[in-house]
Amino acid sequence: MKRYLKLVHMEVHRFRYLMLFLMGVILIFQVGAIISVLSRELSQRWDDPTYNGVRSPFVPEGMLSFTWVISNTNFWFAVPMLISVAVIGLYVFFVWYREWLGRSTFIYRLLMLPGARCQIYLAKLTAILIFVFSLVSYQLLLLPLQKLLFQMMVPAEWRVDSYWPEVIHANRALDLLIPRNIEQFLSIYGLGIMAVLIIFTGILLERSYRRIGILYGLLYVVGNAIVALYLPDLLGLGLPGTYLYPDEIVGLVVGVCLLLLVLSVVFGFRLLANKITV
Amino acid sequence: MRRYWLTIMLGLLAVSGISTYYFFGSKDHLPEFKLVTLQGEPHEGESLTLSGTYGGRKQSEFLEITKEGSRYNGRERNLRRGLISKVGWFYRDGILESFIGEHRNIARGKNYGPQALINEDEFIYAKWVDRRSASTDQGGTLQITVFDRGSGEEREFEADIPVHPGTIADVRRLGEELHIVMFKHLLLDTSAEIYDVVINLSTEQWARTDKLAEGKKMSGEVFNSNDIYRNEAFSEPLSEFILIREDKQAVVSGSIGGNFVSRELSRQFYAYSFLTGEKEALPAFYGSSNSFVSDSDYYMTSLYGNLFSLVQFNKKEAVVSQYNLSSKEERREYVTLTPEQFGASEIIDAIIKSNKIYLLLATTGAPVAAVVHLQGEKLLYLGQVTYETPEAAKTEKIEYLRLRSINIKGIRIWG
């Protein structure tokens, strides 16, 4: 356990500057966008008291809400999030391939460590999850601070309160990243974890069998994706008179996804223990 | 331990941020509503679903309100519901859905509404098990399942049918005769051939086939199309009739054989009696749907037993006409309902089901819903939407609630 935690820490430590960079980008883009949108709106209001840039039939005339601000900064919220998704997406590959980079390949030392090799695999997975969920939480933490900024900038007589889920729903990027119910959160991040595990196994296939391993890895990833994506249709979901009920089909799809997830982990462990070459 | 502060901090941030949001976020949402009874029988309001939007700070959200409370669609949207809703359309029928809930294994693989007949006594389902060649008229084999809801006995048999194995569109029972309405829709047919396949439930054999409508191919710029209009009632002898709708349409743009847009020129309903095999035209008034619709006028129809009802409505009034298919008696525009009768200012929506009219009305405050029986015009139910918690009125405005339609749970949707 201790060795696993050390490995996790090592992975987190290696990513720390990128993590700080991503957090900084998110902060600068979003806060900058909020200040810019609010300054523009407020300066026009100061110049012309009859001006009203809020085009919503649901808020009292002239009132500004935090939801309005967030929906008007859609693009500047989406850009740093897309950068973060792209960086972590690339890091899913880099977290493995970096071990083989350089003259004195680090993978030698990792594989020579005492204890089960599966800990390397689990540590890399845990690190990726920590990066993803930390950034999601960081975004959630930023929102109240951004609301505070909104309250500091807008006079109380021009403000109207908002509901948090509504604030998140007003921004397409936030709505996608932070679903409104926990079941959807577990579903999309569960699928994300499954995708990471399948890619990990694909990478290990490539590392184990080298040239032909590229083909094996691609086939493994594509095969799993096809099964996960088309299974509901294969089971007749959407066709009248299908033998299985929709809740049973959904249950089977979840079961198969969990099976693929477990198989990927077990397969990945075996490759790492028996097949990996340096 | 100090060396690991970064990992520990990030781990804690990840867990605490997300769990706090989902714990507190679930309690911070747009106001909840419910429908409360003002007058009449509360059970009449149990099946009502009012839908529309509630305006938030930036955009409105779709919601449904019942006696139990309200449900915002966006809040509950997820992958599982998305997958399940892919099939919901063919058995969203309230009766079939509740039957599936009670008899999951009996209804397994038999969940397509138009192929089922369910009443208090029985569940009957018809499906093709052998279509032989669908392109020819060699016929096929139908599998019929009859489940007695009282005794719990199930009977299943197969019958050879010497007609084209078309799409099953309705199932009716009259005595020992099972009537299965089918469509034969061939390529480029705009009008389907519609026929009634009769199976004798005692002998478990095909008895006869009656043709209800001729199929017509598209030619020229004006063409015919047809469809059936199912009876809401399932029990004998109420389900004696079915309506056949024949439309004449003109091509407005595009060309035949490719994509085109058409416009309805005329519509005629015919009543077909499963009992006598006779097909008779309804008065032209009931097919003049073009004249019922404008920017502010709407209409809805219903076939319940022998009664074909039509409501024409706008903001100011709802006018009901009825035609008795059995006695040929017509009561044109015999009921006029105004919003003032219900203490309201405008009619928002109206539907007719089971010989009752359901109205959604706007008031100066919260919307109201009314149910009136079409025989005797008795007010059965009057209810009003209210906040679930009175405190919500302090921060929210009922004007932001914009209900658009009224629906009824637990009734047949395949009308």
Image (spheres, coloured by chain):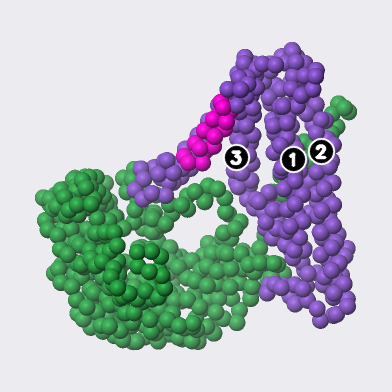
Chain colours: A purple, B green
- The residue sitting at 49% across, 83% down in the picture is B296
Residue B342 image point, x, y percent: 49, 82
Q: Give the CA separation, mark 3 to mark 1.
A: 19 Å
Seen in the image, is B402 located left or right of residue A238?
Answer: right
Residue A53 image point, x, y percent: 77, 73
Looking at the image, which is closer to me, B135 or B286?
B135
Mark 3 or mark 1: which is in front? Answer: 1
Mark 3 or mark 2: which is in front? Answer: 2
- Quadrant for residue A209, please give it: top right
Tell me if I can see residue B151 in this picture. Answer: no
Looking at the image, which is closer to me, B130 or B83?
B130
Q: Secondary structure at mark 2?
A: helix
Question: Are dots 3 and 1 in contact, CB under 8 Å?
Answer: no
Q: Secondary structure at mark 1?
A: helix
Quadrant where the image shows the C terminus of chain A: top right
- The residue labelled by disc 3 is A191
Residue B264 image point, x, y percent: 36, 77
The vertical placement of B368 against A10, above or below, is below
- Badge 1 crowding class, 10 Å Cα cut-off, few under 14, some 14 to 19, many 20 or more, is some
Q: Amino acid at mark 1?
A: Val
Is residue A219 found inside the magenta-colored segment of the image?
Answer: yes
First of labels 3, 1 by sequence position:
1
- The residue labelled by disc 2 is A18
Our reading of the magenta stretch's main secondary structure is helix
Seen in the image, is B9 located left or right of residue B332?
Answer: right
> Which numbered disc covers residue A269?
none
Write down the region rendered in magenta.
A215-231
- The residue labelled by disc 1 is A87
Q: Chain of mark 3?
A: A
Question: Are dots 1 and 2 in contact, CB under 8 Å?
Answer: yes
